[in-house]
Amino acid sequence: MNLQQVFMYSVGASLILGFLSLTVLFLTWLERKFLARLQMRMGPMRVGPYGTLQPLADAVKLIFKEDILPSWADRKVYWLAPLAVFVPTFLVWVTIPFARDLVLANLELGLFYVTAVSVLSILGLVMAGWGSANKWAILGGLRAAGQLVSYEIPLIMAILGVAMLTQSLNIIEVVDGQTRVANFIIQPLGFFIFFTAGLAELGRTPFDIHHAESEVVGGPFVEYSGAHWAVFYLAEYINTFTIAILTALLFLGGWRWPDMPLDGLSHSALSVAWLLLKAYLVVILIFWIRGTYPRLRIDQLMAFSWKVLVPLSFANIVLTGVVLYYDWHWSLLTVASLILMAGFFLSLTFYSGTAAERMTVSVHPARPEAISRRKMDL
């Protein structure tokens, strides 16, 4: 690699970092406004027009806020943990394309690179808990490791199903393979698994177990403040946008599907706009879920991964392999995926109903007439 290439890659990395920083500022404002609309509130409105400068004010506050170091903390581990979380989050964007000719490095094993690098942030969360020398932080770090390792399996299996359809690990080739039909139509089960596992990887509601304030105070970040806490916050929102972009690229056709708006056009700006529109729709869905569903318990979360998503992900791989091996029409895979999903939701509804009945029986074991007699006696 010569000096010119090093310079070009450095410029590209700087542009990506600047774009992601601005995206995080916008996402924080968008989330506040969207959740406020769901909850019939105003949201930020004082700082700047419609509160648009509120994220910038928050960033300035965090930068100048006192950065406290606990006297009993392991200094090296404590300071390196935010970098160990943020650096893998940023490195993923090396091979994520915004358009066919707009990518820092188009890797032939791009999907493999994304999955391999993204799991490194787990180490940073464990380091944050251990370096803080706080029992609540350590519990949060261990819960985070257990959650992220568990949900990595269905996430990677869903990506593998897409690679099987395209016969490639190159992200641009995956997008080009969706010119006529998007992968979420062919593999609705794979789309459901990827999006759900990706939401759990983000640690956002209803999967925010490792930093559940009501249980472990603040998770592995409880001893962090100021700029170092802001790095964790920055990494979380970058990961949110990363999952949204990957969902758009792998399942929603990226800049290719539907092909009508881009037919005969080679201009990259329209491709980028088309991709970002899909990504922000996914972001809105993530925010909507946060404002709708309650937090899961740790046992419910782990059971949902190992008892539901992992078996469904293996079933998705088997169905995809059978359809490809026998060269059947892709619509058969769609029908089979929808049948599996319908069976899953029906069984979940039945299980929830029986669990509620068992709870009712255990709470009120006596017959209604016996309860009435007890009330009369009292």
Image: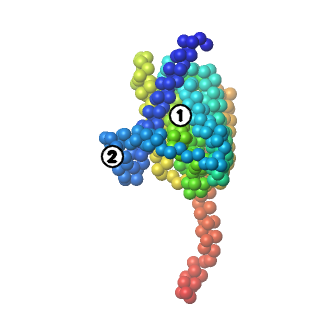
Residue placed under numbered mark 1 in the picture: 242
Taking depth in this image into account, of 108 and 310 the one nearest to the observer is 108
Residue at coordinates 44% horizontally, 25% vertically from top-left?
Answer: 272
Apparent side of residue 52 relative to residue 108 in the rendered image (left or right): left
- The structure's colour scheme is rainbow
Q: Which mark is residue 46?
A: 2
Residue at coordinates 64% horizontally, 28% vertically from top-left?
Answer: 112
Label count reads 2
Residue 373, how many percent across, how many down?
A: 57, 85
Question: Does the rendering let one see residue 17?
Answer: yes
Q: Secondary structure at mark 1?
A: helix
Task: Farthest residue to the left: give it.
Answer: 49
Residue at coordinates 33% horizontally, 41% vertically from top-left?
Answer: 48
Residue 260, how many percent across, how many down?
A: 42, 24
Residue 313, how many percent across, how many down?
A: 65, 39
Taking depth in this image into account, of 94 and 364 the one nearest to the observer is 94
Residue at coordinates 61% horizontally, 66% vertically from top-left?
Answer: 359
Residue 144, how many percent across, how many down?
A: 63, 46
Question: Does the rendering let one see residue 156?
Answer: no
- What amino acid type is highlighted by mark number 1? Thr
Query: How far separated are the C-alphas under marks 2 and 1?
Result: 30 Å
Classed neighbour count for the residue bearing mark 2: other residues with Cα under 10 Å, few (<14), some (14–19), many (≥20) = few
Quarter of the image for residue 86 reads top right
- What amino acid type is highlighted by mark number 2? Arg
